[in-house]
Amino acid sequence: MKLIDVQGEYNAIFSLGGRCLASYRLVQYRLRLYTGVIDWMLSPKLLKVIDLLENRFGDFMKKENLLWDGYDVSGKCLLLTDKVYDITSVHDFPITRNTPENWVMYEEFRVTLDRRIQRFLNKLETCQKILFVRIGGTYEEAKRLETVLSKMIQGEFRVLLINDIDGDTVVEYDWDLLYTCSIGMPLLLDDRLWDQVLQKIFHSAI
């Protein structure tokens, strides 16, 4: 699947993580109407994200599975990592209200997270066409992701998988997958390349 094949209109668009950058760019291009489950988290291992989807978020961020993992780059929030899924909350526990030993805001976080999970699962069952954007992943992981999503989604879906590479162009890979467009691009370059990738993608509600 090529980049031209993922262009068009979608009823829902979600980040499947990797970095917060995916969510940031969706916001910038007005493609994200609500927060996804792992939008502002670190999820470096796509296989773990696939496990999370396959388990329908079972026990995700359960308090007993969390461990304090330091502070974010600004030093203003705790990093709490789900040791089962290797996914880290980056922005949910500010140090003004939480300490490494006492996560005062956990129940508030739990309510918000459960609402996002329910909305995500509902969209998978009710939307006609959904786009997922993921930063980081291999061919084998993308193939398994397609299999899992195919079992969860009633309508159509596409996956835009972006890997960070050197250079100054967008490279399209011929992975011969039915639902996945795989590209490589320097992620932190200016907006020119992101325009090329996202400008012809639209949300039906905008």
Image: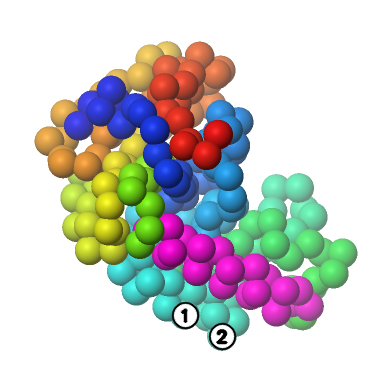
Asked if residue 74 lies left or right of residue 24, the reply is right
Q: Is 6 part of what is drawn in magenta? A: no
Question: Can you see residue 138?
Answer: no
Which region is colored magenta?
A: 103-124
Mark 2 or mark 1: which comes first in sequence? Answer: 1
Relative height, residue 119 to residue 159 (above, below) = below
- Which secondary structure lies at badge 1? loop
- Which secondary structure lies at badge 2? helix
Farthest residue toward the bottom? 64
Q: Quadrant of residue 201?
A: top left
In depth, the one of 109 and 201 nearer the eye is: 201
Q: Which residue carries the number 1 mark?
A: 59
Residue visible at 29% across and 25% down in the picture? 3
Residue visible at 25% across and 28% down in the picture? 5
Q: Amino acid at mark 1?
A: Asp
Residue visible at 43% across and 64% down in the picture? 122
Q: Where in the figure is residue 41, as x and y percent of width and height?
A: 56, 55
Q: Where in the figure is residue 146, as x and y percent of width and height?
A: 22, 52
**Quadrant for the C terminus in the image:** top right
Q: Is 104 part of what is drawn in magenta? A: yes
Q: Amino acid at mark 2?
A: Glu
Figure disc tally: 2
Around disc 2, counting alpha carbons within 10 Å, would you say few (fewer than 14), some (14 to 19), or many (20 or more)? few
Main SS of residues in magenta: helix
Q: Which residue carries the number 2 mark?
A: 64
Farthest residue toward the left? 176
Q: Quadrant of residue 58?
A: bottom left
**Quadrant for the N terminus in the image:** top left
